[in-house]
Image: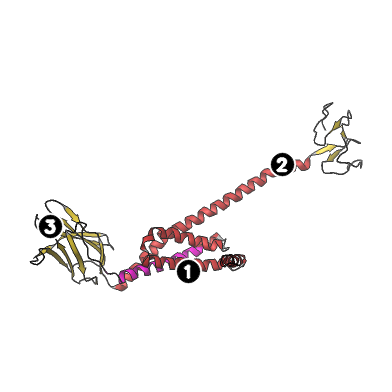
Amino acid sequence: MSAQNDLKDKISKIRQSKYGGYMGLLLATVVTVMLTMVTYIYVSSILCLLPMLVAFLAYGIPTYLGFKDRKKLAIFGLGLFLLIGVALGSALYVNIDGYEAAPLSSDDNSLIDGTATPAQGVPGDTYNFTVTLTSTGNNASVGLELLNNWDSTTRNLTMTSMGVSNSTGMETFYIQLSDMDEGIYYFNFHLSNDTAYVETDQEFGPVNAGMDVVFNNCLMSGILVSYLEIAILFYVLLLLTWWMDRSKKKMFAMEQTRRKPVEKRAMDEKFVCSDCGGDVPTDADKCPKCGAKFDDDEDIKCPQCSAKLLKTDEKCWNCGKKL
């Protein structure tokens, strides 16, 4: 037996066992939690597909392995997405704690080596932001845009020149801030002069909060994202499959109801005994009135004119007598 057939056989045995559904719940928990953590830490390129994938696995794995009770599956989802939220928050914290910002530059390299130091601190610490202007003159004005992700406030600040370097001919700009509110920040630099306006990409940092506060906020954010982005898809999928099954049951019930009158009419159909004229059920072998036996090949006669009839005739074709 090949490895593939062996795996199918094992899965089939699990599905048939009374613990198959519960094993599906356990497997779904492990797979979705690990997938969330690994994706947010290492594979950020598929983040947009993660909610859909996790919701599908959370529903599909237990269902495939035999867990059919949707009410219990809905209750299971509440606990599962709490775990996923904790895993997501932990992954976010790991990313923040180990993050190292890369120097920022504009696309045309008129601004280069934009940095923020230190990368982490607490409210009251002094942060230094510096960037180098490669071409001086033309009334250049260099600024810093600082976004606090916790309260969505943005500051646009003008930077001060440190002078032109004699060796490189480049001009360095800086600004020192010690009044930053608690939060996690994003920053970028921009240049405006007489001819153009350019800016660098946005970079993460600095973190201006204690790491215990950062961890608590990451957990809350992770749980919020888990329920708002993933759990909603899971329960929509649960509701759709429930509605589809319910529709199938209704259609089956309607079909059964439609067939009953037809079956009843078939049972109520009778023909006339050619010997005594009594009513005889179509499936009878002999007349219940006179006891005459019937042969499938025996001709049936009209009791009025003795014309040959079929068992299915409702009236005589010759004299018109209703049978």
Question: Which mark is on residue 147?
Answer: none
Measure the alpha-carbon separation of dots 2 and 3: 89 Å
In the rendered structure, the answer to whether residue 197 lies left or right of residue 289 reads left
Q: Residue at x 36, y 64 (%)?
A: 221
Type of amino acid at the residue the image marks with label 2: Val
Comes first in the chain, label 1 or label 2: 1
In the rendered structure, the answer to whether residue 94 lies left or right of residue 198 reads right
Is residue 214 in sight in this rendering?
yes
Where is mark 3, residue-wise?
141
Q: Is residue 79 magenta?
A: yes
Measure the alpha-carbon separation of dots 1 and 2: 53 Å
Quadrant for the C terminus, please.
Answer: top right
Where is mark 1, residue-wise?
30
Is residue 85 in sight in this rendering?
no
Quadrant for the N terminus, please.
Answer: bottom right
Type of amino acid at the residue the image marks with label 3: Ser
Circle 2 Cα neighbour tier, 10 Å, few/some/many (<14 / 14–19 / ≥20)? few
Circle 1 Cα neighbour tier, 10 Å, few/some/many (<14 / 14–19 / ≥20)? some
Q: Residue at x 43, y 66 (%)?
A: 35
Q: Is residue 65 magenta?
A: no
Measure the alpha-carbon separation of dots 3 and 1: 53 Å
Q: Secondary structure at mark 2?
A: helix
Residue 111 higher or lower than 263, as above or below = below
Where is mark 2, residue-wise?
262
User: Residue 51's quadrant in the figure?
Assistant: bottom left
Q: Secondary structure at mark 3?
A: strand
Range drawn in magenta: 75-104
